[in-house]
Amino acid sequence: MKLKKILSVILAVMIVVVVPTTASAETEGNYTYTVENGEATITDFSSSEEGDIAIPDTLGGYPVTAIGDNAFENCAKLTGITIPDSVTSIGDWAFCRCTELTDITIPDSVISIGEYAFYACQKATSLTIGNNVETIGSWAFGHCDRLTDICIPASVTNIGEAVFGICGLIESISVDASNGAYHVKDNCLIKTESKELIQGFNNSIIPADGSVTSISPSAFYQCEKLTAATIPDCVTSIGDNAFFGCIGLTDVTIGTGTAYIGEGAFYACENLTDIVIPDGVENIDDDTFGWCSKLENISLPNSVTRIGARAFNYCAALTNITLPDSVESIGEYAFNNCTGLTSLVLSNNVTHIGNLAFDDCSNLVLTVYPDSYAAQYAALNALSHHISVKAEDIQPTCTKEGLTGKTYCSICNEILNPGEVIPATGHTPGEWEIEKEPTDSTEGIRIKKCTVCGAELEREVIPVDDTSSSQTGTESDREESNLDDTSSQPTGTGSDHGESTSNDTSSQPTGTGPDHGESNLDHTGTPQTGDNSNIRLWVSFMLISGLSVFGIIVTLKRKEKSK
């Protein structure tokens, strides 16, 4: 019994020591607070209070050092709040939806401001951030619709995403020059070391100088007056919801360096009509282009392997999209209500299609391949589809075009892809070939053929070869000249005449050829047998000789009679 009592006491002591005690809530006036380590944290305030209030610096005798989470949330009738210098932290959602608050002043004593701390203080026109604030949580001043100018003090070292999201009237933001963590360029708030664009506005231009390499989630969330966004090549990632609800956005250019586009990045950009996704992007993530109701054309690179859930949900105007063969997975509701889509090809590489991926695509006819996962999915879900079969390629010739890539449906024989025309190769000319040799009286012919198909490509006439005839004429002229020279010599007999000349061949040219002329006379000057070229000359010569002899004889007879 004594042992049991001892064990009971030990157990009770352990429970007291181990189980932590929580500070009990206290109330003073309209404030509820807790005390811990001698410091008070306001946890609640009566939301029925109206007008301006000054938060006390002590409650129950304890200094107020913190405004707890949700402490003044939905105090919609408060028009002004003064925070005492004793406060060092403001919790998450602390003054969220204080919709009548016109001025926000954070004292220098505050070090941290929680997430959504002043979210939807829609009538606040001015904001002063204390000089000792180090941390500002995500969406801390989001949806403060009437803020126009912001200044970040030098002390701030940590800012969450979309800290000024949906602040449509902000035209200027600045950062103290001595702040080493953040800077502003082209009205973009940038984290200097990580090169992350934290916050953009309707009039922002994303710097292309390399100072920005990533766009933070929700950076341009509902910048409804932003009409164009050029994302430079130096940017590698676009965060979730980065351009969510930018309803005025009509022109988006994504640089070649971008490899990641987050969930909902362009969700509800309802006036966006065309977009090109650069090579290197692998995922079209969940909701990326959901409710882009005017999106008509999107170009996807061969690097894309996944189409996320609801990626093109309610893109009713989408008519032109080609899924590359690299796509392996299509998420649920990916193309839900894409009523303008009439055709989509799913390759053999698709191995997963989510539930209702093509729900309410009333005009869509899928094209799938025999025995593929997509073909089975289409059949099981009673989706209209073609089964694509490839026709045999036609090779081009020298004169006829070829064809490749033609496909048709094996069910209805409809041509699905007319294919790509391959240009005719054209002829390859060979060398000239002699078809007919020319002669001295007739022309010749030469032709050129294709070395591939043998077709005749060119035909030319070869002129008459008059080389031999011209040579013969030259020699005849020379021979005739030689004969003329001989006939001019004396022909009588005796010592006074040319007997010795006709028989003396020592002075006659010897040899043959063009330099001497081939003579048809023998050594006595008589024509050679078979030579008819100078017959008239010789006949004349003989006639004159005969008449000369006859004259001599007549003369002699007359002398005899006279004697």
Image: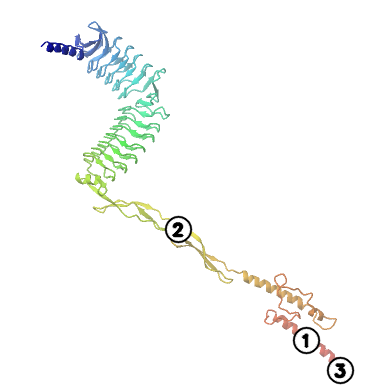
Observer-nearest residue: 271 or 534?
534
Residue at the extreme top = 61
Q: Left or right: where does residue 12 sit relative to residue 55?
A: left
Task: Identify the mark nearer the N-term, 2 or 3.
Answer: 2
Looking at the rendered structure, the secondary structure element under dot 1 is helix
Looking at the rendered structure, the secondary structure element under dot 2 is loop
Structural distance between the alpha carbons of marks 1 and 3: 21 Å
Looking at the rendering, in which quadrant would you find the N terminus? top left
Identify which amino acid the numbered label 3 is placed on: Lys
Residue at numbered disc 1: 547
Identify which amino acid the numbered label 2 is placed on: His
What residue is shown at x 39% (from left), y 56% (from top)? 396
- Residue 294: x, y in percent? 29, 37
Disc nearest the viewer among 1 and 2: 2
Instruction: Give the image quarter of residue 150.
Output: top left
Observer-nearest residue: 458 or 115?
115
- Residue 502: x, y in percent? 79, 80
Residue at numbered disc 2: 427
- Residue 355: x, y in percent? 21, 39
Task: Identify the mark nearer the N-term, 1 or 3.
Answer: 1
Instruction: Give the image quarter of residue 113.
Output: top left
The answer to whether residue 20 shows anywhere in this view is no
Asked if 59 appears above or below 405 in the picture, the reply is above
Looking at the rendering, in which quadrant would you find the C terminus? bottom right
Residue at numbered disc 3: 561
Structural distance between the alpha carbons of marks 2 and 3: 102 Å
Structural distance between the alpha carbons of marks 1 and 2: 80 Å
Tell me, yes or no, whether the two marked residues, 1 and 2, touch with CB atoms within 8 Å: no
